[in-house]
Image: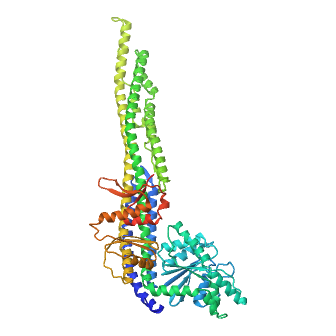
């Protein structure tokens, strides 16, 4: 611990360089992961574009948007690190607070200003980011958070916070609000140490100084009321899955501090009574004691936080893709069973249709023979009779009926896909799922153009004998003539019927069954395969990032133990950390409870250390401890394995208790589970 603030700040610079090198190394690994992911996205695009039977552009859109976010994160991270490196000589403090909470007054106190920046009434005074210096440290005053036009203001404030080593968070004692707590939760999620400052509101009439001092003392000494206000404010933490119980708060009257040190009053008594000296003391003590480590932590968490967010997003997308893959797999199974039944039904319909067609033609032949047995031009007459039967239309209608059944199934399957994906636990977008028609219905309407009609064009070529009544009975001659005509018509029609048979079977097999159903079956399987492949690649990338995150967090943990001059020799072999909240570390040494408390104080997050002396021998004990931690908070769960190709499989964490994905994904223990196991999460229905 440095003896004074100047010495502490000199030491901070050298520690900042160490933090930069650690963070820079991790950033370069993230950048390589970005380049690898780009290839995976391009491959997913290529595979999806080859699937003409099903178009689910939402999958590609999700992946492309995800990749664009990754590129943006990569660029932002590089710029942030470069900026931090350029400004690493300065210990950085950022002041947060709602408009009129007293940020400008705080700045005037620290800079011994004349009060020109302090707001009058309800106007908004801090329009942008302002930097000033105090005791050799850079203080940044940001726009008021949660303001009426605050979207851009909040962005500027959070950008400044990412580069800060310490946050001063101002609230007032007149009912702190939830939107203030929401901004504090964002700051804590960055892993930043935060000092809460409660600016007590009380009008001061310095013309009656004695009364003003008594009222001020009474207000600030009412710690029961102020503690209750802080308690109520800290209770908001649970809404953001955080814990602020250990976060320090100092009660002060900023206006009194400003007036007490102003050149007009120069009232030491008023300044001392404002309790602002405790704010100054806390900052200086914090920098002298922990400033060097905080400089390292700033650099490391500047990379660790987005790295963790990226890892979690990859696992989230992996989970979504698995969920969708299982939907497609379910549709594949359903369609395959339907196909088998459809083939049986189609064969029966075909047999019935052909029998009816044959019966109709045979009946027409007998009727025709009755009227045309002595017709010299019977061939031409029969040709017209065949045309009047409209055999092409009958065949077309038969095929169209089979095709329509497939079309109805296609539409039903598409609707089911959209509904099941839309209302899955992950709420994936299914509005862009489309399928092409299963058969070429226009082709079925033009069967004559395909060659069937040509069979019936021109004379049919039937030669009839000349009737003779001299040697045979006339009735017998007529009977024989009819039989001869019937035989010739049947003989002439057989090639036509054979061709109809061949065409119907070919259309049923190639156009309707193979092109219409089987390709759809195979495409559903391909979508299942592609989504599982994509989920698996995302899981692998998440595991790779998680390993890098472990190394980075382990570096921070070791730096913390060294900083506390606890030269422990141990090996960390697993770690799960939520910056600003909790850190689970698993190692081969024993760390005392007192040491964990020191680490918790330094990191400003709860440190839980679990010792496993020999990981190989104690693997079962280690697994049991992990499972107990997870089960305690997540309920019943188990690992499940899915086989998605001949040599491809993926493990998921299957949660048996039903919780909406949006509810659980921000829970601390859910996020710890992701880091410990780094497997996608699936929810029961």
Is residue 679 depicted above or below 305 in this figure? above
Pinpoint residue 603: horizontal percent, then vertical percent.
44, 77
In the rendered structure, the answer to whether residue 137 lies left or right of residue 470 reads right
Whether residue 573 is visible here, answered yes or no, is yes
Q: Residue furthest left?
A: 617
Is residue 618 depicted above or below 473 in this figure? below
Quadrant of the rendered structure where residue 670 is? bottom left
Whether residue 114 is visible here, answered yes or no, is no
Assign the N terminus to one quadrant of the image: bottom left
Pinpoint residue 118: horizontal percent, then vertical percent.
64, 84
Q: Residue shown at 52%/85% (left/top)?
A: 282
In the rendered structure, the answer to whether residue 13 lies left or right of residue 645 reads right
Q: How is the image coloured?
A: rainbow
The residue nearer to you, when weighing 276 against 448, is 276
Q: Residue shown at 67%/87% (left/top)?
A: 213
In the rendered structure, the answer to whether residue 545 lies left or right of residue 103 reads left
The residue nearer to you, when weighing 310 against 560, is 560
Q: Residue furthest right?
A: 207
Pinpoint residue 230: horizontal percent, then vertical percent.
57, 74
Pinpoint residue 550: horizontal percent, then vertical percent.
36, 72
The residue nearer to you, when weighing 176 against 148, is 176
Is residue 583 depicted above or below 379 in this figure? below
Quadrant of the rendered structure where residue 371 is? top left
Quadrant of the rendered structure where residue 345 is? top left
């Amino acid at each position: 611990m440095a003896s004074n603030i100047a010495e502490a700040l000199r030491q901070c610079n050298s520690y900042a360089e160490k933090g930069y090198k650690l963070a820079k190394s991790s950033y370069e690994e993230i950048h390589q992961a970005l380049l690898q992911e780009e290839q995976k996205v391009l491959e997913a695009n290529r595979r999806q574009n080859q699937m003409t039977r099903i178009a689910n552009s939402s999958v590609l859109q999700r992946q492309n948007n995800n990749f664009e976010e990754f590129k943006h994160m990569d660029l932002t991270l590089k710029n942030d690190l470069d900026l931090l490196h350029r400004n690493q000589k300065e210990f950085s403090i950022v002041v947060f607070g709602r408009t009129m909470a007293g940020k400008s007054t705080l700045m005037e106190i620290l800079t011994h200003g004349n009060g020109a920046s302090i707001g009058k009434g309800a106007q908004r005074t801090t329009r942008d980011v302002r930097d000033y210096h105090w005791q050799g440290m850079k203080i940044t005053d940001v726009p008021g958070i949660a303001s009426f036009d605050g979207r851009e203001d909040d962005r500027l404030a959070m950008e400044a916070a990412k580069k800060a080593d310490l946050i001063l968070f101002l609230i007032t004692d007149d009912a702190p609000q939830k939107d203030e707590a929401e901004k504090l939760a964002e700051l804590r999620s960055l892993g930043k140490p935060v000092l809460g400052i409660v600016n007590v509101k009380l009008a001061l009439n310095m013309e009656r100084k004695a009364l003003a001092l008594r009222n001020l003392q009474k207000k600030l000494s009412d710690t029961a009321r102020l503690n209750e206000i802080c308690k109520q404010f800290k209770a908001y933490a649970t809404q953001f899955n955080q814990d602020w119980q250990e976060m320090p708060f100092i009660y002060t009257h900023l206006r009194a501090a400003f007036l007490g040190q102003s050149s007009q009053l120069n009232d030491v008594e008023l300044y001392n009574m404002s309790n602002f000296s405790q704010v100054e003391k806390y900052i200086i003590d914090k920098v002298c004691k922990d400033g060097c480590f905080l400089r390292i932590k700033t650099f490391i968490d500047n990379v660790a936080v987005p790295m963790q967010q990226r890892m979690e997003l990859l696992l989230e997308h992996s989970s979504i893709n698995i969920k969708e893959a299982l939907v497609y797999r379910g549709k594949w199974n359903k369609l395959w069973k339907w196909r088998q039944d459809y083939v049986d039904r189609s064969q029966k319909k075909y047999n019935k249709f052909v029998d009816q067609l044959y019966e109709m033609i045979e009946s027409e032949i007998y009727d025709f023979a009755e009227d045309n047995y002595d017709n010299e031009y019977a061939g031409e007459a029969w040709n017209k009779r065949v045309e009047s039967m409209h055999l092409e239309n009958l065949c077309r209608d038969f095929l169209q009926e089979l095709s329509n059944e497939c079309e109805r199934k296609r539409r039903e399957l598409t609707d089911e896909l959209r509904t099941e994906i839309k209302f899955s636990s992950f709420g994936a977008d299914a509005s862009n799922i489309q399928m092409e028609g299963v058969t070429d219905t226009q082709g079925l309407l033009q069967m004559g153009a395909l060659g069937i009609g040509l069979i019936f064009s021109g004379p049919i070529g039937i030669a009839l004998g000349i009737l003779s009544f001299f040697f045979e009975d006339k009735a017998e001659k007529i009977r024989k003539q009819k039989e001869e005509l019937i035989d010739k018509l049947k003989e002439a029609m057989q090639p036509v019927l054979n061709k109809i048979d061949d065409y119907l079977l070919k259309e049923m097999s190639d156009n309707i069954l193979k092109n219409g159903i089987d390709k759809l079956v195979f495409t559903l399987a391909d979508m299942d395969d592609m989504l599982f492949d994509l989920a698996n690649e995302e899981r692998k990338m998440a595991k790779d990032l998680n390993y890098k995150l472990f190394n980075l967090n382990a570096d921070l943990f070791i730096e913390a133990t060294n900083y506390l001059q606890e030269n422990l020799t141990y090996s960390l072999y697993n770690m799960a950390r939520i910056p600003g909240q909790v850190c689970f570390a698993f190692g081969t040494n024993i760390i005392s409870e007192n040491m964990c408390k020191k680490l918790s104080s330094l990191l400003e997050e709860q440190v839980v250390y679990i010792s496993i002396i020999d990981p190989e021998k104690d693997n079962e004990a280690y697994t049991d401890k992990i499972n107990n931690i997870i089960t305690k908070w997540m309920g019943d769960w188990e690992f499940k394995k899915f086989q998605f190709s001949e040599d491809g499989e993926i493990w998921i964490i299957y949660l048996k208790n039903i919780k909406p994905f949006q509810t659980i994904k921000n829970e601390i223990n859910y996020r710890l589970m992701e880091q410990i196991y780094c497997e996608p999460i699936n929810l029961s229905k």
